[in-house]
Image (cartoon, rainbow, N blue to C red):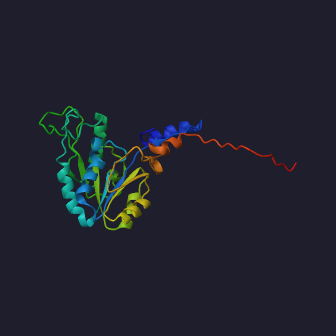
Amino acid sequence: MTGSVSTGKKIFTGAATQLKRVTLELGGKSPLIIFEDADIHNAVSATLLANFFTQGEVCSNGTRVFVHRQIFDSFLMKLKDRTEKIRLGDPADPDTQMGALISKAHMEKIIRFINSGKSSGATLLTGGFRPEKDFKGRDITSGNFLAPAIFTDCDDSMEICKEEIFGPVLSILCFDSEEEVIERANNTSFGLAAGVFTNDIKRGHRVIHQLQAGTCWINNYNITPIELPFGGYKQSGQGRENSLAAIQHYTQLKSVYVELGNVESPY
């Protein structure tokens, strides 16, 4: 089952009555950590993929973007510039880069999260509004379109930094040390995915090893080849999709002993 934590718990409860095996791929609030030595262009590209691909309706999205203080301003400037150039419009148009959200009800839910972020003290740097025209000037007011949003001045305790929004909304958070960002990244009930950007491959592996997430990337994000097991820790689910891990999860082991000699008995 792929869905929310609350739905996953209900399915797991029902399956438990007959000891049925269940793969639960649930929600996430995944961290994407950008260190000071990262390639900023690639880190910005990954941040866009980690938040705005499929209108942000992706469970593994890295919606908590931790950026080292040394590169915070330059990273944010580049991210804002490229975000505002994303082409919203008809998904049947091959030039469109972002379509409409899945439903009006879901769009209104995301708008409530955006309002929550603003009322809690975060700064809406860009986006978060319903556009009237697409990138070709066509009227899109009847659709569930939402301009991709970036929040700054965020705090880990804010609702937008704790709850899964499942839409085109990202929160930028600043950090100073490796130890600090690992602790903050793990401070969540979710554990679906995580990403690290650094040119120090030793640090990349060291940090990823300490992050409590089931699917991780170093210097990329949301890349899921079929050979890569996909799934989460903690309340993000159990079991894995893809790869041999998925086959093993639904395969029963049978142990068979064959005696080729005499049966030894003390009786």
Q: Say which residue appears at 20% left-offset and 36% top-offset.
A: 94
User: Between residues 186 and 122, which one lies in front from this camera angle?
Assistant: 186
Q: Is residue 239 visible?
A: no
Instruction: Please tell me in which quadrant of the rendered image residue 6 appears.
Output: top left
Query: With respect to residue 65, does 134 lie above or below?
Result: above
Instruction: Please tell me in which quadrant of the rendered image residue 168 appears.
Output: top left
Tell whether 56 sits left or right of 22.
Answer: left
- The residue sitting at the front extreme is 260
Q: Say which residue appears at 17% left-offset and 52% top-offset.
A: 81
- The residue sitting at the right extreme is 267
Tell whether 260 sits left or right of 212.
Answer: right
Image coordinates of residue 75 in percent, x first then y, are: 22, 59
Total label count?
A: 0
Q: Quadrant of the N terminus?
A: top left
- The residue sitting at the left extreme is 137
Query: With respect to residue 68, does 262 lie above or below?
Result: above
Image coordinates of residue 106 in percent, x first then y, are: 31, 37
Image coordinates of residue 237 in percent, x first then y, are: 47, 46
Q: Say which residue appears at 19% left-offset and 56% top-offset.
A: 78
Image coordinates of residue 19 in percent, x first then y, are: 59, 38
Q: Is residue 50 visible?
A: yes
